[in-house]
Image: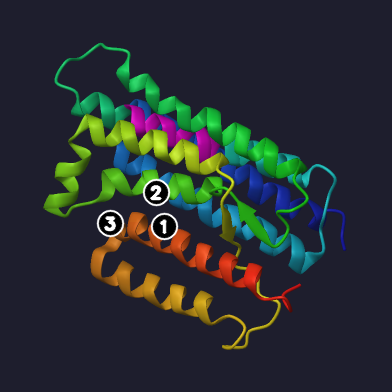
Amino acid sequence: MTYLTKYIPNTITLSNLLSGCFGIVAATRGDLEMAAYFIWIAALLDFADGLVARALKAYSSIGGDLDSLADMVSFGVLPSFIMFGLIESALEVKGTWIPYLAFVIAAFSALRLAIFNVDTRQTDKFIGLPTPSSALLISALPLGTLPWFQMLIASPGFLIILALVDAYLLVASIELLAFKFKNYSWADNQLKYIFMILSIILFVLLRSVAIPVVLVLYIIVSVIVSTKSTRDPTTE
């Protein structure tokens, strides 16, 4: 491995962080759709840095910490700014403190990342909603074009409840599926494959609105897998 090669994963991680910064700027300027797209870019970069690190075997002592710091910006602070803008726009009375409730997402994202970094149980599963999933859920809100969906995000009550539920799920003691395959057989990964197929169909039919639907499906599938593993005495 060359001297420069070992820095490639961290460079991708820093690009994730920069995407979050650019998204925050867009959100503060009122362009919530562009801010949402920056979450998507950050999510792709977050996936890529781990993939590249494994491919190049370019692991570093600061890589994990840097990843958490980048995720805090892109998947904690940026979604909070988007939610803040949505709540502020939905409120009939301006200048109140209510939109600041959106930043509960940032606070609980920080707590979730801190817990993840020291929790040895989360190697092949997640306990609580991963921050990228939380952020992608929020990113769907300004991008949804279906009339019934736009009615929902025009309701400040719905947005506030969603922000609080999202924050709770980040730190909830719920085992969620991590898509790490020990093998690719249908028998051992049936629910994972079904989930992926249904997700693709939902995205084709609903586009960005599919994100919250897929998230609910993800939680349901995770609970089924967790329950099956608990009941199966042969599961390692």
Q: Disc number at residue 215?
A: 1
Q: Is 140 in front, or is 223?
A: 223
Q: Secondary structure at mark 1?
A: helix
Q: Which residues are magenta?
A: 73-84
Label 2: how many residues lie within 10 Å, few (<14), some (14-19) or many (20+)? many
Q: Is 6 in front, or is 106?
A: 106
Q: How is the image coloured?
A: rainbow
Q: Is 140 in front, or is 226?
A: 226
Report the side of 199 relative to 147 (left or right). right
Q: Quadrant of the N terminus?
A: bottom right
Q: Looking at numbered disc 1 in the image, what kind of residue is underneath it? A: Leu
The reply to whether callout 1 and callout 2 are in contact (CB within 8 Å) is: yes
Label 1: how many residues lie within 10 Å, few (<14), some (14-19) or many (20+)? some
Q: Looking at numbered disc 2 in the image, what kind of residue is underneath it? A: Leu
User: Where residue 79 appears, x then y in whole percent?
Assistant: 43, 37
Residue at the image position 19 percent from the left and 34 percent from the top:
155
Q: Where is mark 2, residue-wise?
A: 137
Would residue 19 be seen by someone viewing this image from the given angle?
no
